[in-house]
Image (spheres, grey):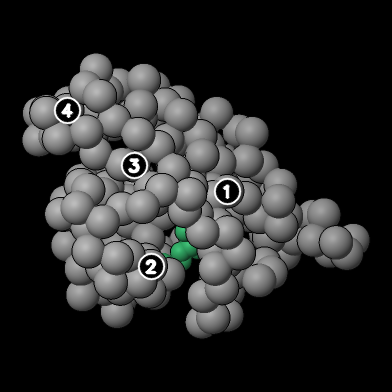
Amino acid sequence: MTLRDSLYRPGEVILTQAEIAEVVARLGREISADYRGKNPILVNLLKGGVIFLADLIRQLPIPHQIDFMRVSSYENGTSSSGIVRIAEDLSTNISGRHVLVVEDVLDTGRTLAYILNMLQIRSPESIEVCSLLRKTATRDTWFDVRYLGKEIPDVFVVGYGLDYNEKFRNLPYIARLVGPDEP
Ligand code: IMP
Ligand code: MG
């Protein structure tokens, strides 16, 4: 963390706390309707997705399980390294199970494409994606996002679990990250 890094800060709000709550409630209704009687495993990607998952499952009245994976594609700062590293794998056998991957934000989609490929090999009964945010400029994505919270502009955002160098996850809203050269 350099001095320059410490000058990055949250700027204009992209999604308010109330808007997030509304989106999460809607996703909860859609998922509950589709997965009734299927006992899905919600696979969450740490660490950014953890706050979203915590709120989402409280909107799911149906039986389900949760599990976690930790991967990193962004080694530092705001630009993609293009490298996906599995730092922690699932603790559940997903063979024959309905898997719903719960992601915070899709940017290039490369991280998720890699993970979906890897999970597919383990023979789940089904596999779908739920993402809170998707950047409109999302490229490279060959997969369907079955449950999408909201499209956002192609800017780096923080808050509600999303970080910049581990900072700002605690904001209850989502805001654009503003750099030191911006007023
Ligand atoms: P992708 O592989 O380019 O789709 O990047 C996906 C991952 O990068 C996300 O799961 C986030 O962890 C991280 N990421 C992408 N965009 C942002 C952002 O605007 N803020 C914080 N993290 C982001
Ligand atoms: Mg993520």
User: Foreground: 85 or 73?
Assistant: 85
Point out the tag, 1 or 4, that comes first from the N-terminus.
4
Residue located beneath label 4 in the image: 32
Quadrant position of residue 18? top left
Under mark 3, the amino acid is: Leu
Judged left or right of residue 33, residue 149 is: right
Under mark 4, the amino acid is: Ser
Does dot 1 land on a helix, a strand or a loop?
loop
Does dot 4 land on a helix, a strand or a loop?
helix
Under mark 2, the amino acid is: Ile
Point out the tag, 3 or 2, that comes first from the N-terminus.
3
Report the residue at 21% width, 75% height from top.
Answer: 142
Q: Residues within 10 Å of mark 4 (few under 14, many from 20)?
A: many
Residue located beneath label 2 in the image: 115
Q: Quadrant of the N terminus?
A: bottom right
Does dot 2 land on a helix, a strand or a loop?
helix
Point out the tag, 2 or 4, that comes first from the N-terminus.
4
Residue located beneath label 1 in the image: 47
Residue located beneath label 3 in the image: 42
User: Foreground: 34 or 131?
Assistant: 34
Q: Residues within 10 Å of mark 3 (few under 14, many from 20)?
A: many
Q: Looking at the picture, does residue 70 appear above or below residue 37? A: below
Question: Picture coordinates of residue 183 (x, y %)?
Answer: 69, 54
Q: Looking at the picture, does residue 82 appear above or below residue 68? A: below
Point out the tag, 3 or 1, that comes first from the N-terminus.
3
Residue reaching furthest right? 3
Residues at marks 1 and 4, CA–CA distance in whole angstroms: 24 Å
Residues at marks 3 and 4, CA–CA distance in whole angstroms: 12 Å
Point out the tag, 3 or 4, that comes first from the N-terminus.
4
Question: Picture coordinates of residue 103 (x, y %)?
Answer: 39, 51
Quadrant position of residue 66? top left
Report the residue at 43% width, 70% height from top.
Answer: 111
